[in-house]
Image (cartoon, helix red, strand yellow):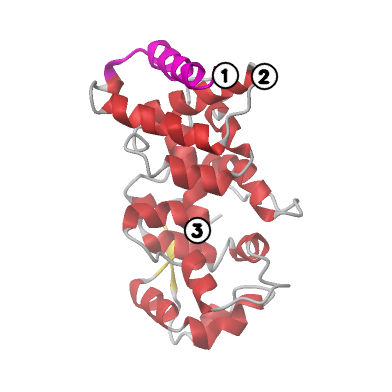
Amino acid sequence: MKLYFMKENALAYFKGNIKNNLYYYKDDNADWIKTIYPDNPLQEFKIKVNDFNMNMTKDKPSDTDYYNVKILYDNLKNISDAQATDERLWVGLAHDYLFKYMQYRFNLKNDVFNEDKIKRNFFFTYGKKRSLIHHPIARLWWVGRLTYDKTAQNPYYAIEYLKKDFPTKVLTLFSSNFSNNPKIARVFLDSIRIIEEDGRTVTREQYHELIRYVNILGGTIILDYLPKEYLQRKIINHYYKQNK
């Protein structure tokens, strides 16, 4: 299967004309982008992947995010980090191969939506790092990129805690100082999994506190040099000290 990214001029056009094109986001397919733009707005991405389908089975679309991290990253893991920071790639996917997924994810077929909703979800509207976590497709890929452990029997073990309330937890995690480090992000999330397997429920406030703790820890020692088990033990011990 071929993937396509949106050309620079086309990206500027569609981003600047959302209000005029708003109605088309309810269309049955994405062919409309090729009929209203004077030239082909898409260009072939030179990495071919197998056909894949996103999970669109839940009544609450955000409940599929956990599963779609695995689907999207498994199929697109050969993309480089540099390519995965390019807005044109994610906008192209959102307006082409994953257009129906985007309609499902934001209930565009049945809901009333405005220009701002389309702009925030189909395009980058923040600084680059923040946009990668806010854009719904880029976010799935980057969560996979920063948590996938190819050495593990279950390479996605670290995202178990993100299964519920996925968007909020991800936005919080990736605003931390350590989130760009896959090793630390995996240890952090797996520590929470271990805590919850002990019969506890890590609340949103406790989650924020653990992130704050690891941020502070990273300011005093180089976390990369710590053995995984040592850092994990420190995170878990901090939780129990705070929540006796």
- Frontmost residue, 180 versus 1: 180
Q: Is residue 15 above or below residue 146?
A: below
- Mark 1 and mark 3: Cα distance apart in space: 38 Å
- Choose top left, top right, bottom left or bottom right for residue 125: bottom left
Does the magenta stretch mainly form a helix, a strand or a loop?
helix
Nearer mark to the viewer, of 1 and 2:
2
Q: Quadrant of the N terminus?
A: bottom right
Circle 3 sits on which residue?
A: 3
Nearer mark to the viewer, of 1 and 3:
1
Residue 192 position in % (x across, y down): 53, 25
- Mark 1 and mark 2: Cα distance apart in space: 9 Å
Q: Is residue 142 above or below residue 214?
A: below
Question: Mark 1 or 3 closer to N-term?
Answer: 3
- At 38% from the left and 27% from the top, the residue drawn is 184
Residue 176 position in % (x across, y down): 36, 39
Check disc 2: other Cα within 10 Å, few if <14, some if 14-19, many if 20+.
Answer: few
Q: Is residue 105 magenta?
A: no
Circle 1 sits on which residue?
A: 194
Nearer mark to the viewer, of 2 and 3:
2
Question: Mark 1 or 2 closer to N-term?
Answer: 1
- Mark 2 and mark 3: Cα distance apart in space: 44 Å
Q: For residue 199, which numbered disc appears in the image?
A: 2
Residue 185 position in % (x across, y down): 42, 31
Q: Is residue 62 above or below residue 78?
A: below
Q: Is residue 232 magenta?
A: yes
- At label 1, which amino acid type do we have? Ile
Question: Mark 2 or 3 closer to N-term?
Answer: 3
